Image (tube, rainbow, N blue to C red):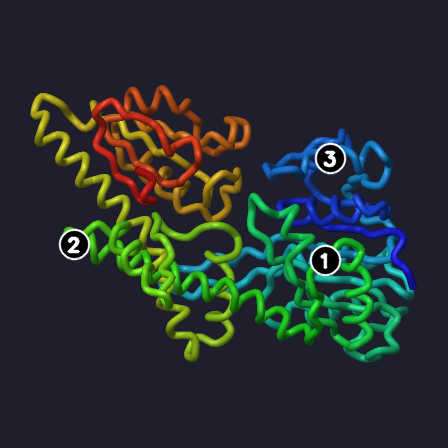
Amino acid sequence: MSFETISVIGLGYIGLPTAAMFASRQKKVIGVDVNQHAVDTINRGEIHIVEPDLDMIVHAAVTEGFLKAVTTPEPADAFLIAVPTPFKECGAGEIPQPDLKYIEAASKALAPVLKKGDLVILESTSPVGATEQMAKWLAEARQDLTFPQTAGIEADVNVAHCPERVLPGHVVRELVENDRVIGGMSSRCSERSVELYKAFVQGDCVITNARTAEMAKLTENSCRDVQIAFANELSIICDKLDINVWELISLANRHPRINILQPGPGVGGHCIAVDPWFIVSKTPDESRLIHTARLVNDSKPEWVIDKVKLAIADFLQANPTKTAKDVTIGCFGLAFKANIDDLRESPALSITKSILKFHVGKVLAVEPNVNNNESPIEICPIEKACKESNIALLLVDHDEFKNIKFNGATIIDTKGIL
């Protein structure tokens, strides 16, 4: 059965580019999102996120009639769910537990429009077992249809997991070129998923089962998290030993089998900062290294804040007529990585909010990729912050920061920009 109409539920950083790629292949695509602003923006042929080249693709798809956005699911032949998977509230020291409420809500919203022959794919990065749970929710809502957990390859509705594996800032290209891991709940589910993605994916579509596909994405991001934790720990050690960590890493990486990553103020985004906890929450006794890496990276923002407090003390000691109210701190960057507008789980944003709480003087937040309507903190122009800051805290290596000049400020460079 061919896929004439495709529905993508969740039009964020993954869902919208995915919807746009299908539409660019002249498939009829119905995007679904609970955010009315996002829906209205897309239907004008515009985008509500920052991603290179995506604006042109969306504009063309909407103008040509292949893409529309709605707030309630409509009938389609394939449904891709790309909604957030946050944590539940937890106390200090407790292991965060995944919250599948958005996947559950998406499942129950699309269930009424399901029909025999449909395909449902969970793209959201999820803990192991989430795809099976989604299939259970669908089956409970539509007892007139059969699903692969009971009917196998004969199921009326096919279900699979296919995690996204793209880098923000390069999503359009990587959606097309990267290999995809496809985990169907039956062989038929996998085969039909491959057929769907081959509408635009040029990379290999590698088939496995749903649980392994879920674990593959978690493993990829946990590996990165462990590597970043090593770099972050090195930066703390080098600071104590009065060694330039950037030079050290550069020298070590000249070894043909060494590739140490760059340290920073922490780890952010909805993948690397989140996915390892999905493994730890399922297997806390076995995932000791992954757990420790998370603790190292989660503690790095506090280390940065301590450096800021020391810089304030040093400034006041050097200027005895001044008080803390006279110290202006410039925080350069709020996004979780360079050259994007994504603030999710951003250590830079967390650090800036903490400084705003404890510092009685002026705090200037600089983020060239976000405007004041989208930011939880008032944004300051780069030139103003460079001129007025007594302490300049570089948190994100945006291109705009790489050649900036400060007016005699104390510089705390967490990204090795300067």
Disc 2, disc 1: CB below 8 Å? no
**Of the pair 91 and 372, the residue shown nearer to us:** 372
The answer to which of marks 1 and 3 sits earlier in the sequence is 3
Report the residue at 79% width, 44% height from top.
24
What residue lies at 76% left-to-right and 29% top-to-bottom? Answer: 44
Q: Which residue is mark 1?
A: 202
Secondary structure of the residue carrying tag 1 is: loop
Separation of marks 1 and 3 at Cα, in angstroms: 26 Å
Disc 3 crowd rating (10 Å Cα; few below 14, some 14-19, many 20+) is many
Q: Residue at x 56, y 47 (%)?
A: 168
Q: Which residue is mark 3?
A: 42
As drawn, the label of residue 240 is: 2
Amino acid under label 2?
A: Lys
| Viewer-side label of 2, 1 | 1
Q: Residue 259 — which label?
A: none
Whether residue 255 sits left or right of residue 335 in the image: it is: left
Disc 3 element: helix
On screen, residue 21 above or below 249: above
Cα separation, mark 3 vs mark 2, equals 50 Å
Q: Of the residues under marks 3 and 2, which one precedes in the sequence?
A: 3
Other-residue count near label 1 (Cα within 10 Å), few / some / many at <14 / 14–19 / ≥20 = some
Q: Quadrant of the N terminus?
A: bottom right
